[in-house]
Image (cartoon, rainbow, N blue to C red):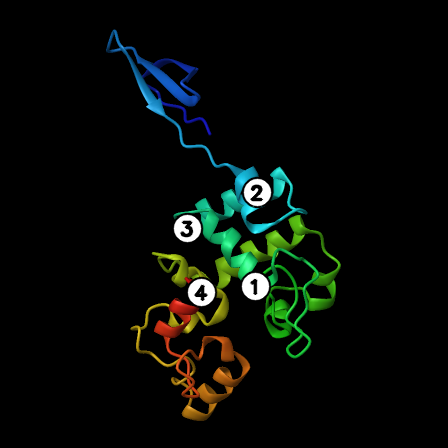
Amino acid sequence: MFYQIKTMKKVVILSILGLNTTCIQNSNYKHTIPVVIEEIDYTSLKEKYNFKEFTDSNCNFLSQIAKKHNIKEVEWLFKLIWLESRGNPKAVNPKTYATGLIQFMPKTATKLGTSVFDLYYMNIENQLKYMDKYLEKFLKGKQVNNFTDLYLVIFYPYAITKEDNYIIGMEKSAKYAEIVAQKNKIYDINNDGFITKYEVDKAINL
């Protein structure tokens, strides 16, 4: 990414010891200032998460989404997609009919102006556009400080600002919290019939 800086006389890209470096020559100074540019290794990320169907264009789009929503690390989006669908845009939960890369629920898809049927037949690029729309709608400017915060935007947005001992669904009723736990037993680490924010954090960051 290149930034236009009015005070700069010229910008030269160099390669030093294998690192991409921008040498900036300021009109007010005689010396050039080397600035190391951080590059995202999409090939390694795709291999790490086994995202064989993802193109460099898809990865660049994920990077744009991360910047747009102030998500500190683009890898968090890769990990989120891996946890939800293993990177399969046609992944469908047979119990809830959640569909796609981030497992859009039927009601959620409708709120975004589409349907799980349409999402199923979308390619990765188009599903990522709805992922972007989802984050814009449900993140609502909330700060994503870590991967758990990002995951909760998908799993249970209400819990983002809550303490670690918050029981998922308890703001509605104990019965509802039990139903949430029954449908997501993988997060009920202590098998008490409820899921706390702390348990979700531990389950997704093993």
Seen from the viewer's position, the closer of residues 103 and 88 is: 88
Q: Secondary structure at mark 3?
A: loop
Identify the residue position indicated by label 3 in the image. Answer: 71
Nearer the observer: mark 1 or 3; the answer is 1
Q: Quadrant of residue 131?
A: bottom right
Relative horizontal placement of residue 31, taking residue 64 as reference (left or right): left
Q: Earlier in the sequence, mark 4 or mark 2?
A: 2
Residue 156: x and y in percent read: 46, 72
Relative horizontal placement of residue 156, taking residue 6 as reference (left or right): right
Neighbor class of circle 3 (other Cα within 10 Å; few <14, some 14-19, many 20+) is many
Q: Earlier in the sequence, mark 1 or mark 3?
A: 3
- The residue located at (43%, 60%) in the rendering is 150
C-alpha distance separating marks 1 and 3: 18 Å
Name the kind of residue labelled 4 in the image: Ile
Pointer 2 and pointer 1: residues touching (CB < 8 Å)?
no
Identify the residue position indicated by label 4 in the image. Answer: 204
Identify the residue position indicated by label 2 in the image. Answer: 59
Q: Secondary structure at mark 2?
A: helix
Nearer the observer: mark 3 or 2; the answer is 2
Identify the residue position indicated by label 1 in the image. Answer: 84
Name the kind of residue labelled 1 in the image: Glu
Tell me: residue 97, above or below residue 147. below
Name the kind of residue labelled 2 in the image: Cys
